[in-house]
Image: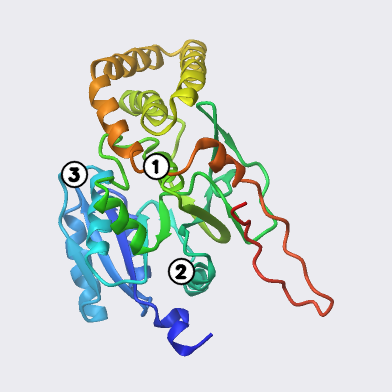
C-alpha cells in the first residue's frame, strides 16, 4: 500500500448526533476529539447545553469540532443533513453515529483500512451491536414482513447483511451524492424513527449497492427496552407496513402484507396490553388515510431500483470462515462475490 493509500491519509468526517439528557454524550464527544485524523461535526438534537461542552473541548483541542444547531428536526432529518453536508465536501469516508453508543475508537483506523479494501459497491460498513445479553451481529434478515436475528457470530471478519446498525455506519460519499441526485433521502423523513434504518438498508441494496458488516468494532447500544411508550409502538406497527409498501415488488407485498397483518394482530392481542391494540388500530388507520402519499413515494423511489428481493437475499449467505495458512498468517478477508 502506497503512502497515499494509507488509512491515516484518508480525509474522514465524523458526524455525531447529540441528544439532551444523555450524560454519556459528553464522554463521547471528548473521546472522539482525541482522534487526530477526523473532521468532527456535532449536530444538536434538542441539546443546547452540548454547545458549551463543545466549546470547552475546542478550547482544549484548538477548535477541532464543528457545532451545528439543528434542534427542531427528527433524527432522520439530522442524519440526512449530515450526509448532505458530506456530499458537498471532499471526504473519502464518513462516520455517522448516534450518541447512545459506546465505541472502541482505538480500532477506528483499522476499520477504515478494512473499508478501503472492500469493493466500491460496498458503500456501507457497519459494526456489530451489543445489546446487553442480546447481540445482533450485523443486523437482521428480512423474511416475509418479519425479522430474524443472527444468533451466532460469523467467523469471518466481514460478511454481508441486509440490515446494518444505523447507530453507527461508515459510508462512501459517492452513494450519498447518488441518492440525493435521484431525490431519494437516505433516511426517509416519513419514518421519523423505528425501522428507518431498515428502510435505509433496503434502499442501498435495491439501488445495486451492498452493505458489509464487521465484528472488528462492537457498538454497545444504551438504554432499556422493557418499557415501550405508546407513540413508539405506533411507529413500530406503522413503519413495518411502510417498509413493505415502499420498497418491495407487488408480488412480495401481496405475500408479505397478510403475514405482516396477522403477525401484528397476534402480537397485539396476546400482549395483554390495551396500548398495543390501540397503537395497532391507530397505525393501520394512518396507513389507510395516507395510502396515496405512500404509493406516490413508492413510485418515485422504485423508478431507480435495479435489484430485486430474490437478488438481494441470494447475496446474504455468510462467507466461508477465515483460514490460516501453514505458517500461521491470516488469510485475506473473505468477502462473498456477486454471483
**Residue at x 21% of width, y 59% of height:** 50
User: Circle 3 sits in a helix, a strand or a loop, which is it?
Assistant: loop
Of labels 1 and 3, the one closer to you: 1
User: In this figure, which residue is indicated by the disc labeled 1?
Assistant: 305
Tell me where residue 322 sits by quadrant. bottom right
User: Circle 1 sits in a helix, a strand or a loop, which is it?
Assistant: loop
Q: How much space separates mark 1 and mark 3, taking CA atoms? A: 28 Å
Tell me the quadrant of the picture where the N terminus can be found. bottom right
Whether residue 19 appears in this view of the structure is no
Q: Residues within 10 Å of mark 1 (few under 14, many from 20)?
A: some
**Residue at x 65% of width, y 46% of height:** 317
Q: How much space separates mark 2 and mark 3, taking CA atoms? A: 28 Å
Q: Residues within 10 Å of mark 3 (few under 14, many from 20)?
A: some
- Residue 274 vs 164, above or below: the answer is above
**Residue at x 18% of width, y 56% of height:** 49
- The residue most toward the bottom is 3
Earlier residue among tags 1 and 2: 2
Nearest to the observer: residue 113 or residue 313: 313
Of labels 1 and 2, the one closer to you: 1
- Residue 193 vs 211, above or below: the answer is above
Is residue 151 found left or right of 64 in the rendered image? right
Q: Which mark is residue 105?
A: 2
Earlier residue among tags 2 and 3: 3
Q: How much space separates mark 1 and mark 2, taking CA atoms? A: 35 Å
User: In this figure, which residue is indicated by the disc labeled 3?
Assistant: 73
Q: Residues within 10 Å of mark 2 (few under 14, many from 20)?
A: some
Whether residue 128 appears in this view of the structure is yes
Amino acid at each position: 500500500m502506497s503512502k497515499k493509500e494509507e488509512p491515516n491519509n484518508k480525509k474522514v468526517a465524523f458526524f455525531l448526533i447529540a441528544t439532551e439528557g444523555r450524560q454519556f454524550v459528553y464522554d463521547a464527544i471528548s473521546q472522539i476529539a482525541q482522534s487526530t485524523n477526523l473532521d468532527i461535526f456535532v449536530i444538536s438534537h434538542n441539546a443546547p447545553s452540548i454547545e458549551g461542552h463543545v466549546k470547552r473541548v475546542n478550547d482544549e483541542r484548538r477548535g477541532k469540532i464543528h457545532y451545528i444547531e439543528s434542534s427542531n428536526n427528527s433524527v432522520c432529518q439530522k442524519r440526512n443533513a449530515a450526509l448532505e453536508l458530506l456530499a458537498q465536501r471532499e471526504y473519502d469516508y464518513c462516520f455517522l453515529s448516534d450518541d447512545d453508543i459506546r465505541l472502541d475508537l482505538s480500532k477506528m483506523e483499522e476499520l477504515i483500512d478494512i473499508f478501503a479494501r472492500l469493493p466500491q459497491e460496498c458503500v456501507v460498513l457497519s459494526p456489530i451491536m451489543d445489546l446487553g445479553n442480546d447481540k445482533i451481529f450485523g443486523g437482521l434478515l428480512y423474511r416475509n414482513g418479519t425479522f430474524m436475528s443472527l444468533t451466532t457470530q460469523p467467523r469471518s471478519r466481514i460478511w454481508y447483511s441486509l440490515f446494518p446498525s444505523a447507530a453507527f455506519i461508515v459510508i462512501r460519499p459517492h452513494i450519498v451524492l447518488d441518492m440525493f441526485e435521484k431525490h431519494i433521502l437516505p433516511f426517509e423523513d416519513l419514518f421519523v424513527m423505528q425501522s428507518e434504518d431498515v428502510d435505509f438498508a433496503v434502499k442501498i441494496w435495491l439501488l445495486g449497492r451492498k452493505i458489509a458488516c464487521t465484528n472488528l468494532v462492537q457498538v454497545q447500544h444504551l438504554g432499556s427496552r422493557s418499557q415501550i411508550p405508546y407513540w413508539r409502538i405506533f411507529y413500530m406497527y406503522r413503519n413495518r407496513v411502510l417498509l413493505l409498501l415502499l420498497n418491495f415488488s407487488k408480488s412480495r407485498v401481496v405475500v408479505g402484507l397478510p403475514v405482516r397483518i396477522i403477525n401484528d394482530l397476534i402480537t397485539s392481542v396476546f400482549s395483554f396490553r390495551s396500548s398495543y391494540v390501540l397503537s395497532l388500530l391507530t397505525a393501520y388507520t394512518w396507513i389507510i388515510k395516507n395510502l396515496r402519499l405512500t404509493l406516490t413515494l413508492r413510485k418515485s423511489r422504485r423508478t431507480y431500483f435495479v435489484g430485486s428481493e430474490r437478488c438481494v437475499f441470494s447475496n446474504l449467505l455468510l462467507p466461508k470462515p477465515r483460514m490460516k495458512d501453514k505458517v500461521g498468517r491470516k488469510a485475506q478477508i473473505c468477502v462473498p462475490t456477486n454471483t
